Amino acid sequence: MTKNERGVAPSTASAPSFYEFVAIVALMMGTTAFSIDNLLPAFEPIRQDLGVSRPADLQLIITAFMIGFAFMQLVFGTISDVIGRKPALMIGLAIYALGCVLALVTDSFAVLLVARAIQGMGSAAARVLSVAIVRDRFKGREMARVMSLCMMVFLVVPVVAPTIGSGILLIGTWHHIFVAMFALSVVLGVWFSLRMPETLHPEYRVPFSVRGIARGMRMTLTNRRAVGYATAMGLMMGALMAYVGSAEQIFDSEVYHLGAWFPIAFSSVAAVMSVASFVNSKLVGRFGMRHLSHAAIIGFTLVGAAQTVFAIAFDGHPPLLLFCSLIALNQALFALTVPNFNSMAMEPLGAIAGTASSFIGFYTTLLGAVMGMIVGQSVAGSVLPLSVGYMVLGLLGILAALWAEKGRLFGGQITAG
């Protein structure tokens, strides 16, 4: 299939415009963030309604979602290489809607966790296929630019989602938040089915074959760049998951006691990430993915070290403005790193984009969920564990990037990048 000078596969007359394409993909990615962040203000009502004794146990609402999300990414990307991106997404959205309904009718915390895992399983389709669809149409720096624009729109979701959740709680119960999630899945399903053509290149469609799937996995696992950058992404995702999972404890119930101001503090940090993603889309064409992301992950680790120093100096309770400033700076550096790492991991695997996206999504999410749970469960009335987690996970991410690049950061530019 021929491509134009931007590296885009020719589209049909019914295909969406560039910016509508970005909006649809961003909404696919945003389903995951919306499913997590708009539920954060509901932790305390859920604890009271369902009799949860330990505040830290509420983090399992996030962890259960992410575990289901991680494992099903292995399935959806691979299936999409066989049946196409559109049918795979519709199956995923149906599973997600089922999880919403189960959460609506339960009065058990254990069943709620099952519902969240089912939601995560369905949401995996939207997330993994968003990456595969972008890889179907773009490559090199243009792929990184598109991913950054999608990430910018996607990161608006954490800005508004906690406020939406708080607003829903003013007029209803936490159950109504799941009604909003169900409605989101319907909107995405209708929009995608009406406007997005099938993006899987005909020459890349494969018959279902265990041998073929195993071959795709082997190609992914034996690609040093893919595994190295996926590992670095997973470690940085661990820092993000630790922050999101412990945000209610830090901002509200245990450290800063912000009450109704919690969504505003959380959203302010997320807004900085969104701006940084836009900046990344502009800078990546000038500096390249390697130079920008390598500098950003080094900065991420150094800011994590600064967080740790201030956390120790203030006995785990640094001033709120100082804490938010450092967290926001690190989330901005996260946004300058992860989209580029994702593009570099996927770049050599275009012929198996669905399978590669599946494995990379599974691996990074599972690694992030486990690291996030370890760090997040350590948060108990102090921001020190989170600060140390950012520093250590950032340092490990640098080592993973070094391994991917055979010991040399800031190397020559990626092919077509």
Image (cartoon, rainbow, N blue to C red):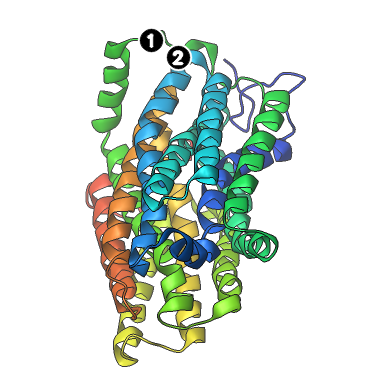
The crowding category of the residue bearing disc 1, from other C-alpha atoms within 10 Å (few below 14, some 14 to 19, many at least 20), is few
Secondary structure of the residue carrying numbered label 2:
helix
Q: In which quarter of the view is residue 360 placed? A: top left
Answer yes or no: is residue 115 visible. Answer: yes
Quarter of the figure with the N terminus: top right
Query: Taking 94 as reference, is 53 above or below it?
Result: below
The residue located at (36%, 55%) in the rendering is 60
Residue 288 percent coordinates (x, y): 48, 50
The answer to which of 185 and 332 lies nearer the viewer is 185
Q: Which mark is residue 208?
A: 1
Secondary structure of the residue carrying numbered label 1:
loop
Q: In which quarter of the view is residue 278 placed? A: bottom right
Q: Residue placed farthest to the right in the image?
A: 13
The answer to which of 414 and 193 lies nearer the viewer is 193
Residue 43 percent coordinates (x, y): 48, 63
The residue located at (31%, 72%) in the rendering is 379
Q: Which mark is residue 82?
A: 2
Q: Are the two marked residues, 2 and 1, in contact with CB atoms closer than 8 angstroms?
A: yes
